[in-house]
């Protein structure tokens, strides 16, 4: 055993190539691929988020930090009372508890996101499973609340 390892953290590396990815979750118009869960890492989670024009979540906040790194396309972010447009190569960090939203633009935009804690992966999987088909804001609000996410619509 690694003497410097934290007792709740895995002691094995994670290598995830595209052939290993789980099926993407359909969440508010996006395809969100879970690359690493909190169980995998012992703390944070990593996702690949992809979507077409106009996809993205309503204003919301949660008890974990979240960072986004834009790979392709253009993404508009609303963070608190400010808005910005992120192009490829841009990093956006949102502190825990901050109301935020984003909209993907163009034919296909992609970004990697990282949360500072576990929980989002289970939420995305549940939304994908329970909200297949037409969007239902009331059910989305209820599902999100189960995972400590408040929709600030």
Image (cartoon, rainbow, N blue to C red):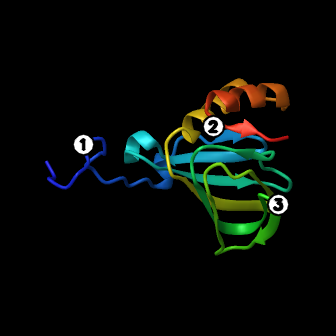
Q: Which mark is residue 81?
A: 3
Q: Give the Cα distance between marks 1 and 2.
A: 27 Å
The answer to which of marks 3 and 2 sits earlier in the sequence is 3
Q: Give the Cα distance between marks 3 and 1.
A: 40 Å
In the picture of the structure, the residue carrying the numbered disc 2 is 124
Q: Nearer the viewer, mark 3 or mark 2?
A: 3
Q: Position of residue 55 (x, y in %)?
A: 81, 50
Q: Give the Cα distance between marks 3 and 2.
A: 26 Å
Q: Position of residue 25 (x, y in %)?
A: 64, 39
Provide the secondary structure element on which disc 1 rests. loop
Q: Which mark is residue 91?
A: none
Q: Tally the marks.
A: 3
The quadrant of the rendering that contains the C terminus is: top right
Q: Position of residue 95 (x, y in %)?
A: 62, 57
- Name the residue rendered at 65%, 48% in the picture: 97
Left or right of 9 on screen, residue 77: right
Question: In this orientation, does residue 132 appear?
Answer: no
Q: Nearer the viewer, residue 2 or 19?
A: 2
- Name the residue rendered at 31%, 54% in the picture: 13
In the picture of the structure, the residue carrying the numbered disc 1 is 7
Local crowd at mark 1 within 10 Å, few (<14), some, or many (≥20)? few
Question: In this orientation, does residue 54 appear?
Answer: yes
Local crowd at mark 3 within 10 Å, few (<14), some, or many (≥20)? few
- Name the residue rendered at 24%, 42% in the picture: 7
Look at the numbered discs 3 and 2 and tell me whether their residues touch, using CB distance below 8 Å: no
């Amino acid at each position: 055993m690694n003497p410097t390892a934290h007792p709740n953290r895995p002691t094995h590396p994670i290598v995830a190539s595209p052939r290993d990815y789980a099926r993407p979750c359909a969440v508010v118009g996006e395809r969100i691929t879970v690359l690493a869960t909190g169980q995998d890492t012992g703390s944070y989670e990593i996702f690949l988020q992809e979507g077409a024009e106009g996809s993205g979540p309503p204003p919301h906040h949660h008890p974990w930090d979240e960072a986004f790194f834009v790979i392709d396309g253009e993404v508009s972010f609303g963070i608190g009372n400010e808005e910005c447009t992120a192009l490829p190569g841009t990093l956006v960090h949102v502190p825990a508890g901050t109301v935020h939203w984003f909209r993907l633009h163009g034919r296909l935009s992609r970004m990697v996101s990282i949360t500072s804690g576990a929980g989002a992966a289970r939420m995305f999987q549940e939304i994908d499973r329970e909200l297949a088909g037409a969007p239902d804001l009331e059910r989305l609000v209820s599902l999100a609340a189960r995972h400590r996410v408040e929709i600030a619509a």
